[in-house]
Image (cartoon, rainbow, N blue to C red):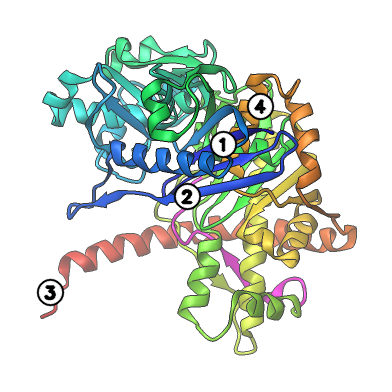
C-alpha cells in the first residue's frame, strides 16, 4: 500500500503522520520541542536537535509501515529560520518567533517606510519577521554570520537535511519580510536596505513543488528509502487551512486556540498603504496561486482559560453549560477581548480587556456568555473589515481549534456572523495539509479540489446554520454597543498604561 507523510515542525512539538491518499491516517509520531529560555528573556532553538526530533518522528512512522511505500513527504513549519554553513550545518541557534530582541531593529524600518515594506511584502515590520533576526545576528554574532551560506526557513532546513537541496516555499519565504509578493521572489530593495546578501537566500518554490529526493545519509537517519521525493509545504496554519478544505476565495478559516487566527483566501494581496494600520498580514497561500489575509485576536481561548483558572470551581463544559442558559446579551454584561492588547483592526498594545454592564445580579453564566459573545463580535469585526479591504464576500467559515469542541460556541459564531459554519475534525491539520501538498506534487491528486474531495471521506463534518432571528438580535447589540466599546475606553486605557508605568517606577522595592 502507498502512503504520504506529512511533517509539522511546530513551536511546541514535532510531528509526523502517514496517511493514505484517501485521507485515512495510518500512524503518527511526535517528539517534544527544544526551546531554550534565557535569563534575558531570549528564546532559542538548537536546529540540530530539531532535526533529530523530526528524523525520529519520520523513522517511527516508517518503521510502523514496513511493508508499505512512502510516495512523498511534505513539510509544514512555523515561520522561523535557520542559518547554516556550506555543509548545511547550523552556525547559530534559531531565534524563536516570540523572542523580541529584534524590537529595535523592527522599529528602525520606519526610516525605510512602513508603507513601502507593506506594499512589497504584505507584512508590517515587526520583531517576528525573519529579516530582523538576521540583521540582529549580523550585528551581534558577526563570526557566525561570516560562516553563513544559507538563511533558510525551518521548512526548507528540514527539506535540505532530507535532500541536500536548499529551497523554501513561497509561503514560508513571505514570513521573512524579504519576499516580493508581486514577483514571487526575494526583494532586492528590502535586502539592500537590510544589508543582507541575496546569495544567502535559497530558491523560493511553489508549495507542492518537489525540492529533491532523500539522500543516503537521510535514509539512514529517517528509515525512508533513498530517492523518496520531498515536496515543499508551507507555514503550519496555511497547511492546516488547506487540510480543512479551504481552497477558494470567499472561504475563511477561524482557528480558536489560545489566540484566534482568522484566515481568508483572496485572489490578490491587499497591501495598499491605506490598509497598513489595520495590521492584516497579506501573503501567498499554499494552493491555486492564491493569497490569504490573516487577522488575529491575540487572546481568545486564552481569556476563557484565564477565567476558568482565576475563578476555579467549574470545568470548560460546565461553564459553557451555564452560559447556554443565559439570554442573548448576557443580561447586559459585555466583554471587550483585548486582554493582551489589540492587534488586527489597528495595533494598540495599551488596549485592555473589560467587562462592562455589571450589576449585583450578574451571574457566572452571564460572565461566560459575555466572554464568548465578545469574542464572536470581534471575529465579526475582523471578517467585515476583511471583506471591505479585499472587495470579496466571505460566504462560509471553517472552524477548528478548542472552541470547535463546543457546539454552543460554534452556533454562536454562525448566529453572530450570519454565515454558515463548518466544523471539520481534521487530525493534526498542519501535518495533514503538508501530506496533501505532497500528494499534489506527486500527481496523486489532479488538483487541490480533487485532493479535498478525496480526503473528505475520512473527515467528519458538522454544519451550523445561522438563525436569522438570533442574528438580528446580535446585530442590534453589535452595532449599538459593541462597536462603541473600544473607542469609549481607548483614552482611559492609555491613561491606565501610563499610570502603571509611572507607579512601577515610583514604588519602592518590596522587601
Task: Determine whether, in the image, residue 412 is placed left or right of residue 55.
Answer: right
Q: Between marks 1 and 4, how big is the CA–CA gap?
A: 10 Å
| The stretch drawn in magenta includes residue 329 | yes
Along the line of sight, the residue nearer the viewer: 90 or 151: 90
Tag 4 residue = 439
Q: Secondary structure at mark 2?
A: strand
Determine the image quadrant of residue 340: bottom left
Tag 3 residue = 508
Q: Identify the image quadrant of the N terminus.
A: top right
Mark 4 / mark 3, whichever is N-terminal = 4
Tag 2 residue = 30
Q: Secondary structure at mark 1?
A: strand
Task: Tell me which residue sits at (69%, 23%) in the image.
Answer: 267
Q: Between marks 2 and 4, how big is the CA–CA gap?
A: 22 Å
Mark 1 / mark 4, whichever is N-terminal = 1
Q: Between marks 2 and 3, how big is the CA–CA gap?
A: 48 Å
Report the mark closest to the observer, 2 or 3.
2
Amino acid at each position: 500500500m502507498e502512503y504520504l507523510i506529512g511533517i509539522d515542525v511546530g513551536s511546541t512539538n514535532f510531528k509526523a503522520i502517514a496517511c493514505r491518499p484517501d485521507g485515512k491516517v495510518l500512524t503518527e509520531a511526535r517528539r517534544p520541542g527544544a526551546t531554550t529560555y534565557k535569563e534575558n528573556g531570549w528564546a532559542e532553538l538548537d536546529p540540530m536537535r530539531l532535526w533529530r526530533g523530526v528524523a525520529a518522528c519520520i523513522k517511527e512512522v516508517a518503521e510502523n509501515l514496513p511493508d508499505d511505500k512512502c510516495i512523498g513527504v511534505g513539510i509544514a513549519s512555523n515561520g522561523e529560520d535557520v542559518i547554516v554553513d556550506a555543509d548545511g550545518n547550523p552556525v547559530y541557534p534559531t531565534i524563536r518567533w516570540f523572542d523580541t530582541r529584534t524590537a529595535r531593529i523592527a522599529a528602525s524600518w520606519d526610516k525605510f517606510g512602513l508603507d513601502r515594506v507593506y506594499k512589497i511584502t504584505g507584512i508590517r515590520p515587526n520583531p517576528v519577521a525573519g529579516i530582523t533576526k538576521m540583521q540582529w545576528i549580523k550585528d551581534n554574532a558577526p563570526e557566525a554570520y561570516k560562516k553563513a551560506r544559507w538563511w533558510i526557513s525551518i521548512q526548507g532546513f528540514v527539506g535540505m537535511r532530507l535532500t541536500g537541496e536548499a529551497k523554501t516555499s513561497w509561503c514560508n519565504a513571505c514570513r521573512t519580510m524579504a519576499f516580493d509578493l508581486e514577483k514571487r521572489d526575494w526583494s532586492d530593495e528590502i535586502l539592500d536596505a537590510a544589508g543582507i546578501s541575496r546569495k544567502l537566500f535559497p530558491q523560493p518554490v511553489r508549495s507542492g513543488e518537489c525540492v529533491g529526493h532523500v539522500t543516503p545519509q537521510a535514509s539512514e537517519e529517517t528509515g525512508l528509502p533513498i530517492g523518496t521525493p520531498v515536496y515543499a509545504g508551507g507555514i503550519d496554519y496555511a497547511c492546516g487551512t488547506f487540510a480543512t478544505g479551504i481552497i477558494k476565495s470567499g472561504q475563511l478559516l477561524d482557528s480558536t486556540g489560545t489566540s484566534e487566527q482568522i484566515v481568508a483566501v483572496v485572489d490578490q494581496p491587499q497591501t495598499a498603504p491605506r490598509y497598513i494600520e489595520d495590521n492584516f498580514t497579506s501573503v501567498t497561500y499554499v494552493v491555486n496561486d492564491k493569497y490569504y489575509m490573516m487577522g488575529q485576536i491575540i487572546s481568545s481561548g486564552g481569556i476563557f482559560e484565564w477565567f476558568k483558572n482565576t475563578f476555579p470551581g467549574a470545568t470548560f463544559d460546565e461553564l459553557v453549560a451555564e452560559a447556554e442558559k443565559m439570554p442573548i446579551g448576557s443580561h447586559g454584561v459585555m466583554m471587550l477581548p483585548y486582554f493582551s492588547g489589540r492587534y488586527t483592526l489597528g495595533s494598540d498594545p495599551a488596549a485592555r480587556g473589560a467587562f462592562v454592564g455589571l450589576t449585583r445580579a450578574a451571574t457566572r453564566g452571564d460572565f461566560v456568555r459575555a466572554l464568548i459573545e465578545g469574542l464572536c463580535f470581534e471575529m465579526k469585526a475582523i471578517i467585515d473589515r476583511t471583506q471591505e479591504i479585499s472587495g470579496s464576500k466571505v460566504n462560509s467559515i471553517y472552524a477548528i481549534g478548542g472552541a470547535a469542541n463546543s457546539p454552543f460556541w460554534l452556533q454562536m459564531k454562525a448566529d453572530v456572523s450570519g454565515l454558515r459554519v463548518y466544523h471539520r475534525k481534521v487530525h493534526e491539520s498542519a501535518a495533514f495539509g503538508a501530506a496533501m501538498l505532497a500528494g499534489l506534487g506527486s500527481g496523486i491528486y489532479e488538483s487541490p479540489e480533487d485532493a479535498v474531495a478525496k480526503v473528505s471521506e475520512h473527515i467528519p463534518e458538522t454544519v451550523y446554520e445561522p438563525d436569522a432571528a438570533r442574528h438580528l438580535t446580535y446585530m442590534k447589540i453589535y452595532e449599538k454597543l459593541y462597536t462603541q466599546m473600544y473607542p469609549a475606553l481607548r483614552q482611559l486605557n492609555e491613561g491606565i498604561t501610563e499610570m502603571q508605568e509611572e507607579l512601577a517606577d515610583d514604588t519602592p522595592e518590596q522587601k
